[in-house]
Image (cartoon, helix red, strand yellow):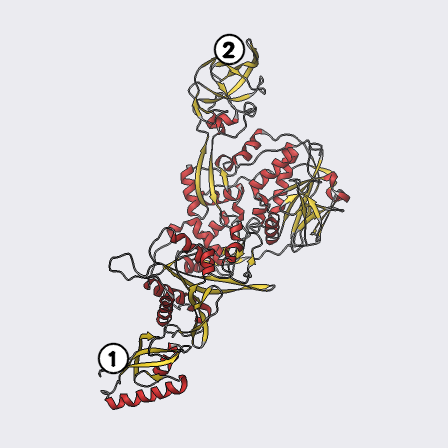
Amino acid sequence: MKVSLKWLSEYVDIKLTPRELADRLTMAGIEVQGVQTIGGWEKVMVGEVTEVNPHPDADRLKLATVNLGTQQLTVVCGAPNIAAGQRVPFARVGAQLIDGHTGEMLTLKPAKIRGIVSEGMVCSEKELGISDSHEGIMVLPSEAPVGVPLSEYLGDTIFDLDVTPNRPDCLCLMGIAREVAALTGEEVHLPEIDYQEEEQSIDSFISVDIIAPELCPRYCASLVTGITISSSPVWLQQRLKSYGMRPINNVVDITNYVMLEYGQPLHAFDYHKLGGHKIIVRRAKNGETITTLDEVGRTLNKDILVIADGEKPVAIAGIMGGLESEVTDETTAILLESANFDQATIRRGARHFQLPSEASLRFEKRLSRGLPLVALKRATWLFHELAHGKVAKGVVDVYPGKVKPEGVLISNEEVKRLSGLDVSIDEIVRVLTSLGFECQQTSVSSQALVFSPYWRSDINRAADLVEEVIRIIGYDKIPTTMLSSTLPEREPGPRLELRKKIREIMVGLGFQEVLTYSLTSLEGLRKLSVELEPEALKVANPMTKEQEYLRPNLRAGLLAALASNQKLEPGGIRLFEIGKVFLAKGDELPQEKEMLCALLSGPKASLSWMGEKGEFDFFDAKGVTENLLRGLGLIAEFKPGSDQNLSPAESAEIISDGDKTGVSGVLHPKVTEAFELSGTVCLIEIDLEKLLTRPIGEKRYTPIYRFPAVSRDIALIVDEQTSYQQVESIIKSFPLVTEVTLFDLYTGEQIPQGKKSFAIRVVYQSPEHTLTDEEVNQIQQKMLDRLQRELDTTLRG
């Protein structure tokens, strides 16, 4: 939010420099992000045009005599709106101005135009850098002091404030004025709100009915007749321009002015266009339509709050008015609305229609219910003064959401407990009173009962009041003290710990973590579909076509990242990502699952004359999976898989504790081609939700065996369909077997058709004594018998 220091000075006396004031506000919780100075005009004065004559040699040029107080100068001017009696900005020779045609900065030099020397220049707003207006000269108010530097008269300092969402009262000049007054000990000068009323009551002109009180807790209105629609005074226009608002007419400008002044959005209806002279605040009907001020027809639904007359909707509450009740140049009577609306309803409606505005942004932050009446009276006073209107007696104030104010107890003990600052109750009352709070004494001398002012909607408990006290006294006054008790022991979250452990293991295995977007395109997901199109959840309001769907897997984003990296990195690439995927569940909210996905691609080793040759393959992916699960304290088993994105001959399901945990294998050639990948790509995918149900990282101490081990090599002939894992699990089930290693796989001559040979080294070791050959022979014979019985194996001679 932007704040004009000159405008702010009307409500509170400011004796600090702009930089000092910015620092004080920032330290009090109202961050000043930037300070902009307007009006560094040198050699530009306020002048008075005393005489305008035609140029003797040019029909479109005029000779203007400008009085600067101490001297009079003649200039050649081509502006169509120049006239005698005007107060204007006059630039002397040497002044720095903006070229109205090119936009470049230039230094004004003496010039002879059609034979007559021009001794300066009467300036437009664009030439001064105030706005883009260049159709004519800038005309100052008649009270502008002649001969005064323009920087003194029009110069200003603009603060750019970052107001937190819980402080909607600071989205206006009065809110900031109250903050400044509390910080500097000054008084707030309240704007004028008392005006003369006519005899006839407003109740005889209009009726207001709130049918949806849960969405509109308060609705206030006043009636002003006999108004004249015209341009606003120059001073009002300048203030709106300093906030980036374009002046339109006195009615619209006054509503914007009061919104900036008090923070309460207002809306003016043409009274004579309201059917039945009624206002009905209600939910819209499904399919009901309204044409808004931007001349766009909009279809409404029951979640939208509307302001209706006796026949139809005339405004979308808190968002935009209707075209049929618009104030025009022919308008002579207005009904001025000042209401309080439900913040969620306004936010939802503004998003639905994509109509964010200064008004809706304020309503979305839960404005105080006490604000509409005060802002209404201020705006009505301005209409009476600036639009020459006659005000009907009284105001409409329908207040179904009125609640009895409840005080909040605060004590100096509570201030000390929460902040460590020892503040007396008298000082607490002084600070809160300076902020507009009402403080009442209680039976306990160290306590006070505090009631919030009408403009504050964010005070709910004692901690909120403590914050108010401390930020005004100064956060720098809080003492540094030791903790009064020990910190509680950290309780690690299982999900967080699992992610951390996986990251450590994967990085240790040479992988790099990447983060991809949770939103993706259907085109990217279809690249993964070999047979079926993936079911994906479409986002209601996508930002781009590439981010229309919630990802049902991590594969698409990770493979796209791999494709980008392959173009730049000729060596091996290992990537992994931990993230959530979103699975459709009919009309219910999607299921969110945390997954791990990893990719291996390219050469196994770095480029070297002695490096290992060959690319990553299925067994590398299998080894990574085993190492990962082993690092988590789990045992990985594998069985043939059927994932459509993986090659049928080189894919496996990952089994842990008897349950499928994920998949591993070589990417299907069709998927590789779709993503324009080169070489063999291996993929690992693990469902982390299933790992969370198992004990992760449990470690047991096993002493180092003191006695020597005995190793035996055996060669087994098995069926081609028999996996090594089946053989290994049987061997490991026997006591004293500590290690099993497959060191050769052979098919060919001397091996029967449909068979293969496993060469296996088995290591036996006892923790209690040195094994004898007889003990080893007995165990091994039992092992061979079981292998022959269950897997039909035979020893190879």
**Residue type beneath disc 1:** Ile
Q: Is residue 592 above or below residue 733?
A: above
Q: Nearer the viewer, residue 311 or 524?
A: 524
Q: Where residue 509 sits in the image (x, y, percent)?
A: 33, 64
Marks 1 and 2, how far apart at CA: 108 Å
Q: Residue at x 50, y 49 (%)?
A: 433
> Does the image show residue 173?
yes
> Does the image show residue 447?
no
Residue that mark 1 sits on: 704
Residue farthest along the front direction in this orientation? 749
Between tags 1 and 2, which lies in front?
Answer: 1
Query: The residue tagged with tag 1: helix, strand or loop?
Result: loop
Q: Where residue 774 sits in the image (x, y, percent)?
A: 25, 91
Q: Where residue 612 sits in the image (x, y, percent)?
A: 28, 62
First in sequence: mark 1 or mark 2? 2
Q: Where residue 510 sits in the image (x, y, percent)?
A: 33, 61
**Residue type beneath disc 2:** Arg
Q: Nearer the viewer, residue 348 or 28?
A: 348
Residue that mark 2 sits on: 114
Query: The residue tagged with tag 2: helix, strand or loop?
Result: loop
Which of the 4 image quadrants contains residue 405? bottom right
Q: Residues within 10 Å of mark 1 (few under 14, many from 20)?
A: few
